[in-house]
Amino acid sequence: MLKVEGLTKHFGGTKALNGVSLEVEKQEIVGIIGPNGSGKSTLLHNITGLYLPDKGNIWFEGTDITNLPIDKRARLGIGRTFQNLRLFKLLTVWENLLVPAIQLKKPKKEMEEQAAELLELVKLSHLKNEQAQNLSIGQQRLLEFIRAMMLDSKIVFLDEPTAGFHPNMIQTFIDTLQELNRRGKTFVIIEHNIPAIMEISTRLVAIAAGEVLMSGDPHSVHSNPEVVEAYLG
Amino acid sequence: MEQLEKRILLALFLIALILPLFMDDYVLHIIILSCFFIMVASSWNLLAGYSGQVSFAHMALCAIGAYSSGLISTHLNLHPFLTIIIGALAASFLGLIIGVLTLRMKGSYLALTTIAFSEIIRLVLNLEYKVTNGSVGLSVPGLFGDVSSKIPYYYTALGLVCLVVFSIYKLVYSNFGLTVRSIREDETAAAAMGVKVVKHKVIVFVISSFMAGIAGGFLAHYNMLVSPELTTITQMGMVIAMAVIGGLGTFIGPIIGGLSLELISEYVKEFGNYHLMIYGLLLILVLRFSPRGIAGLLKKKSRVQNNPIIKSKGLENEVQK
Ligand SMILES: Nc1ncnc2c1ncn2[C@@H]1O[C@H](COP(=O)(O)OP(=O)(O)OP(=O)(O)O)[C@@H](O)[C@H]1O
Ligand SMILES: [Mg+2]
């Protein structure tokens, strides 16, 4: 459903992405791992439209979206979260969830049911009327995750979704993710938490220095000497 | 909006309705001016407080409304009720242009650009004698012809302020308003959530300019005079102070701020030009102790009471401070 070809992005002298190609099929959960500064977030920014690539193309469900503005990609069904958390801080949890649904012009009842159900899934219903900034980091990450789901996203990109989690929240996150995946959603997850990503991903992609090192079954990628070397070196 | 705020507004409205029964012209005059300031402060708050576009061109746009209406009613002999609307359309058209030009600007860049625009308008109005009569100002027909009673003006001002404030209420508490607030919080995140950022920002600029234009037009035909005084940075500062002291990004804030600061400044003016000093002092106090202004004080208590996190951490006292 998503196809990326030869994506290249330079920042001055830094080659953040150097010809990255990647395909994601429907209902996959693709984990992306790689050392700090290897270009994971930059890849995500290019796919979701925050940055425009210097070279390369991106197709989503058959259409070339390489140069589409970010909001248009969102309305097509490409959702995302941010590594550094970008909630609407002074808005309530509930309002945060309604914003994307409003842009899709959904009926009021439908969006409210959807928001209530997602809150239930991540166990945040009791914080519905709280300002987003009052939530703990972990709760904020969960909220940002379900906010992206309110776009009816077909594919969702999560940038380090469990960073700053209280350990017992990780299970809530995994359960929610797998439930949504069963309903047909596709996920691409950047994660430094190796045990967690090994558990949830159906495929693992290792990135180093702006290039795809390897892609495949999580265990074989994880134990590959080259990948281990990149992580340690 | 909270219950307490609704009650305050209702009480204010009821008092305002019967005020002419027992108040003299001087008081009515001050309330009429307050209505003008509530309209500009509320519409500026819509732009700055809700959409996050802190513009300093609001009073210049207000003046555009005033001058356009004044000139058209004088030269084309149209009724001021009609020309006020035309003037407001002129203001919103200019607002559209500024809105588009400043789209990508944030913070101090937006501030400086809009100050520059405002200064250009001020200089032109001051120096131009043939059409707008320069710094002396332009005489324009009264809204009610030669009627000297304040009462028709008073009720018109009250009607207009209710109309403007009610429209803002409807906007702010709609899906559109929520979308606009999300842009204020984080433009990039809003875009990533499918928000058409540019469209919404520009629409808010146009609407708030229209409202400023209405206020300006009304003031012109009430005073029967328009002068470049309206466009000074001092006037803009007063409007900002009203919105901020009342509570930026709150619905009731600019209403309370506009009313109370206008009352204070009228009272203090007897002793000289001290009102600006008082505004400044109030501004500092508010920003230090209640960033959401007077409206924030009304809310603070209930927010803390209903806040499970603050409660569970035993932080009530911290927040109260
Ligand atoms: N906006 C930018 N301007 C300049 N350089 C950038 C920018 N964004 C990223 N970079 C650089 O591009 C490289 C890749 O950064 P990126 O954030 O994509 O890494 P990452 O894999 O997400 O790392 P981390 O695991 O730390 O999040 C880094 O060298 C970074 O310094
Ligand atoms: Mg990153």
Image (cartoon, rainbow, N blue to C red):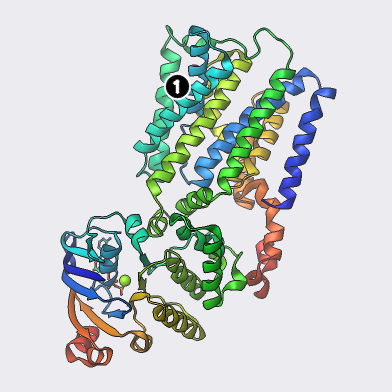
Q: Secondary structure at mark 1?
A: helix
Query: Which class describes the residues within 10 Å of circle 1: few (<14), some (14-19), or many (20+)?
Result: many
Which quadrant of the frame does ligand 2 lie within? Answer: bottom left
Q: Compared with residue B292, is residue A110 higher up or lower down, i.e. above or below?
A: below
Residue depicted at 45% across the width and 81% down the height: A179
> What type is the residue that disc 1 sits on?
Arg
Which residue has dot 1 on it?
B122
Residue depicted at 45% across the width and 68% down the height: A144
Residue depicted at 50% across the width and 48% down the height: B176
Q: Compared with residue A227, is residue B11 higher up or lower down, i.e. above or below?
A: above
Quadrant where the C terminus of chain B sits is bottom right
Tell me where residue A197 sits by quadrant. bottom left
Residue B241's x, y, as percent? 59, 38
Q: Is residue B76 left or right of residue B244?
A: left
Q: Compared with residue B50, is residue B58 higher up or lower down, i.e. above or below?
A: above
**Subunit ID for the residue under disc 1:** B
Residue A82's x, y, as percent? 38, 67
Q: Is residue A2 left or right of residue B61?
A: left
Residue B321 visible from this viewpoint? no
Extreme residue toward the right, this view: B22
Q: Closest to the observer: B314 or A213?
A: A213
Tell me where residue A177 sits by quadrant. bottom left
Residue B185's x, y, as percent? 47, 54
Residue B307 visible from this viewpoint? yes
